[in-house]
Amino acid sequence: MERRSFLKKSALATGAAVASSSLSASPVPAIEKDFYELRVYHLNGGGGRNRLQKYYTEAVIPFLHKRGAKVVAFNEYSMEEPPVMYILHAHKSLSDYYDTTLAMRTDPDFLAAAREYTAVTANNPVYDRYETFLLEAFDGFPRLIEPDKKGGIIEMRIYESYSEDAGIRKVKMFNDGEIQLFQSLGFHPMMFGQHLAGQYMPALTYMMWFEDMEERDALWSTFGPSPEWKAMSSKEEYANTVSHIHKKFLVPVDFS
């Protein structure tokens, strides 16, 4: 009996403490930010490119725009064969991404618009395969900024980290000053996202646009020597946060 009485009193005391703490704590507002799906299509020649563009123009882009999402698409700058197309879907929230993905399987208007694309045969596919990445936008750059019409070159960088902690520290570095440094030096950032699923984990991806390669090279030449970067990169908490860097140069596709 004494033990039950003690446990009951302890539970009541704990509940009161939690309630008091909950009432006194100020709620922290959540940052509204994008969740990105980056698709990398390895196409079945030029015909595959044309059919993918038609599918996006007639079905995917109108459907996503109706739901408040954005779409930007890019070809590889090198235009190597077989062709590869990169398409970024920017959803306003994780739930929007999930709901839209489900709706694309059942919405009658979307399915009607996509009928030609979904009717492809095994001997004439649109692509050999596609990869998909799910990313969460950084707090310090929460929404996609689409490239300006002057943006002739897109640089996409993927930073791998040797551990989850190292990846988190690199994201913190961007949020606490690196993004602002890019902007102060005249760079044109488009998006920053931490990988939630996909290749290269743990990793992050970001994109910036430039008028041409000359502007790109000139801007990067100011970054490394800048006093702000030297001070930031010398901090112990940011040491060894990136283990591998992948760079891709892309060009915008008109249909997006």
Image: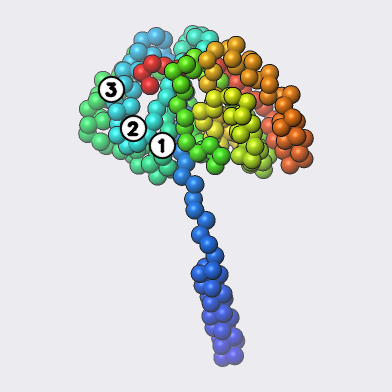
- Of the numbered discs 3 and 1, the one sitting upstream in the chain is 3
Image position of 200 (left or right of 30): right
Image position of 175 (left or right of 239): left
Where does label 3 land, which residue?
58
Residue 80 shows in the view: yes
Q: What residue is drawn where x is 64% and y is 40%? A: 176
The CA span between labels 3 and 1 is 19 Å
Q: Are marks 1 and 2 in contact (CB under 8 Å)?
A: no
Q: Position of residue 61 (x, y in %)?
A: 33, 27
The residue lying toward the viewer, choosing from 177 and 85, is: 177
Badge 3 crowding class, 10 Å Cα cut-off, few under 14, some 14 to 19, many 20 or more, is: few
The CA span between labels 2 and 3 is 11 Å
Where does label 1 land, which residue?
91
Instruction: Relative to 37, say whether 214 is above or below.
Output: above
Residue 181 image-quadrant placement: top right
Q: What residue is drawn where x is 42% and y is 24%? A: 72
Image position of 73 (left or right of 111): right
